[in-house]
Image (spheres, rainbow, N blue to C red):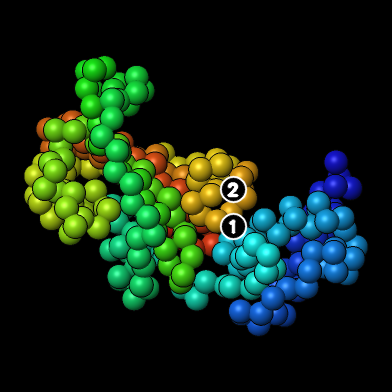
Amino acid sequence: MTNHTSISQRLIEDLGGVIAATETGDRLPSEPELARKLGVSRATLREGMRTFETQGLIRRRQGSGTYVVRPSQVIESGLEMLESIETMAERIGLPVSMGSLKIDHRPASKDEAQVLSIASSANVIQVTRVIHAEERPVSYLVDIVPDDMLQAQDLDESFTGSVLDLFLHRGVPVLLTSRCEINAVTATAEVARSLGIQRGDVLLRFVAYLYATSGRIIDYSFSYFLPGYFRFHVVRRVG
């Protein structure tokens, strides 16, 4: 166990040095060459490369190789204020765009019905979108909303995909607060495919419950972030 840990730590340090010495946009040596140079197996090398890929420092391109990308800007925000990714990115002047948007009108699952306090036979609207920054997908977002909270006209061509911004712009319902659970999770096949990473890579996940002033939960959301492109902090009161 100790030996494996020391090998992994050494690999991260050595591979980090190779990446740091490579210009942004340049291709790294091939896997066989890099594994030989660093004195590890290709399987061990791939484990190490996944760490740097989820940090946004390298990107593998099928049939082409692995390139150093390095995010030029990181979206940083305090957790005291609830804001959309678009709002956070605009504040630091980072252009972001919506890579894909999927809207499903479907029956609520048992868990969703319980969280949203709706009948088991009720329907929800699920909004799934991928956000791109610097020409790559950096977050995968899912909002699940009771279907009486969204109207067809809300989801027209002007809809950017941000349910939070939609509610704030519309002004109804009036929002009160949000409760958020934060975990480090491994990417499922669907999330990995959408973000262009490997299944099992570690992501930061927010599970959030958005409350209206009535006390009702009106949005049950799951947000997955690539660690290298986001930095969140919280200011805590002493005592």
The quadrant of the image that shows the C terminus is top left
Query: What residue is drawn where x is 13% and y is 55%?
Result: 169
Residue type of the residue flagged with mark 2: Val
Query: What residue is drawn where x is 81% and y is 53%?
Result: 44
Q: Quadrant of residue 99?
A: bottom left
Task: Classify mark 2: residues with Cα within 10 Å, few (<14), some (14-19) or many (20+).
Answer: many
Query: What residue is drawn where x is 63% and y is 65%?
Result: 61
The picture places residue 180, in percent across and down from the top left corner, at: 36, 41
**If you read the primary sequence from the N terminus, does the residue marked by circle 2 or circle 1 appear first?**
1
The picture places residue 81, in percent across and down from the top left corner, at: 28, 54
Query: Is residue 196 visible in the rendered structure shown here?
Result: yes
Residue type of the residue flagged with mark 1: Thr
Q: Are marks 2 and 1 in contact (CB under 8 Å)?
A: yes
Residue 11 in the image: above or below residue 176: below
Q: Between 94 and 234, which is closer to the camera in this rendering?
A: 94
Q: Quick one: SS at disc 2? A: strand
Residue 78 in the image: above or below residue 210: below
Residue located beneath label 2 in the image: 202
Q: Quick one: SS at disc 1? A: helix
Residue found at the very far front of the displayed protein: 63
The quadrant of the image that shows the N terminus is top right
Q: Quadrant of residue 118?
A: top left
Residue 16, label in figure:
none
Residue located beneath label 1 in the image: 54
Q: CA distance from mark 2 to mark 1?
A: 7 Å
Residue 94 relative to residue 205: left or right: left
Query: What residue is drawn where x is 24% and y is 48%?
Result: 163
The picture places residue 96, in percent across and down from the top left corner, at: 36, 67
Task: Classify mark 1: residues with Cα within 10 Å, few (<14), some (14-19) or many (20+).
Answer: many
Residue 102 relative to residue 27: left or right: left
Query: Is residue 180 visible in the rendered structure shown here?
Result: no
